[in-house]
Amino acid sequence: MKHPIKAIIALLLRLYLGYAFLMAGIGKWQSGFNGKAVSGFLKGGLSKTSDALLATQGAEAAAHPSVSDTWGWIISNILLPNAEVLAFLVKSGEVLIGLGLILGCFTTLAAIFGMTMNFAFLLTGTVSTNPQMVLGFLAIIVMGAASYEIGLDRFFMKKLTIMFPRLSKGWLRTPFPVEK
């Protein structure tokens, strides 16, 4: 092992974040999480835009919205009309991200997708544990190849990048890091 301390830290972060995501995804599958639930969550985010706050709470509240107008437009025009598809993507994505992190399989990609999901929740006005998770995912990404020294990636990431050399060039080096 080239970076034992970083590898152990990354493993602990992976296990914690992976478990949280896996349990959230399994819970959504078991509870019947669907487009109606997603619509409710997204409409809650819309209620935190400046226009909605102006209409319900006045100018003082509207001056400090939790959700930007741009994200509100994305919610209204892209996410809400596709709530059913989004529900499937969220619960499947949480399970896959959780498994990827726990097993150390496509670790950096799982961290990037997990961070993206957390940012989407944050942009929709939900804080919860999302900022801490973003920092954890960012740490995994920054650790690069050390983040998969203890996991399945250790056995096949180098072979994958040898078979597909483009994966180790340019911006693709981030999701497919390989120790030289």
Image (spheres, rainbow, N blue to C red):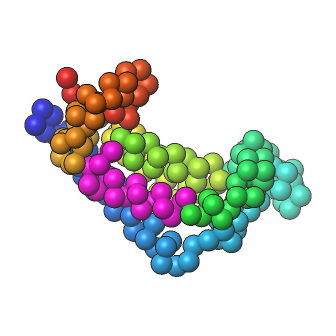
Residue 57 appears in the rendering: yes
| 129 displayed left or right of 18 | right
For the residue pair 73 and 159, the one nearer the viewer reads as 159
**Can you say whether 32 is above or below 17 in the image?**
below
Magenta span contains residue 102 = yes
Query: Quarter-wise, where is residue 47 in the image?
Result: bottom right
* Residue ID at (32%, 52%): 101
Q: Position of residue 49 (x, y in %)?
A: 77, 51
Residue 153 position, x and y percent, is: 24, 43
**Residue placed most toward the observer, 76 or 156:** 156
Residue at the limit of the structure toward the left, as seen here? 1
Q: Which residues are magenta?
A: 89-107
Compared across the picture, whether 30 is left or right of 173 comes to: right
Q: How many marks?
A: 0
Q: Name the residue nearer the viewer: 38 or 81.
A: 81
Q: Looking at the image, which residue is at 86% across and 62% down?
A: 56
Looking at the image, which residue sits at the far front? 163
Q: Quadrant of residue 82?
A: bottom right
**From what the image shows, is residue 32 above or below residue 73?**
below
Residue at image position (34%, 58%) is: 99
Residue drawn at 22 percent across, 34 percent down? 159
Residue 43: percent from the left, percent from the top? Answer: 74, 62
* Magenta segment main secondary structure: helix
Query: Residue 82 or 72: which is nearer the viewer?
Result: 82
In the image, residue 126 above or below residue 154: below
Kindly tell me whether residue 173 is visible in this rendering.
no
The N terminus sits in image quarter: top left
Quarter occupied by the C terminus: top left
Q: Is residue 5 magenta?
A: no
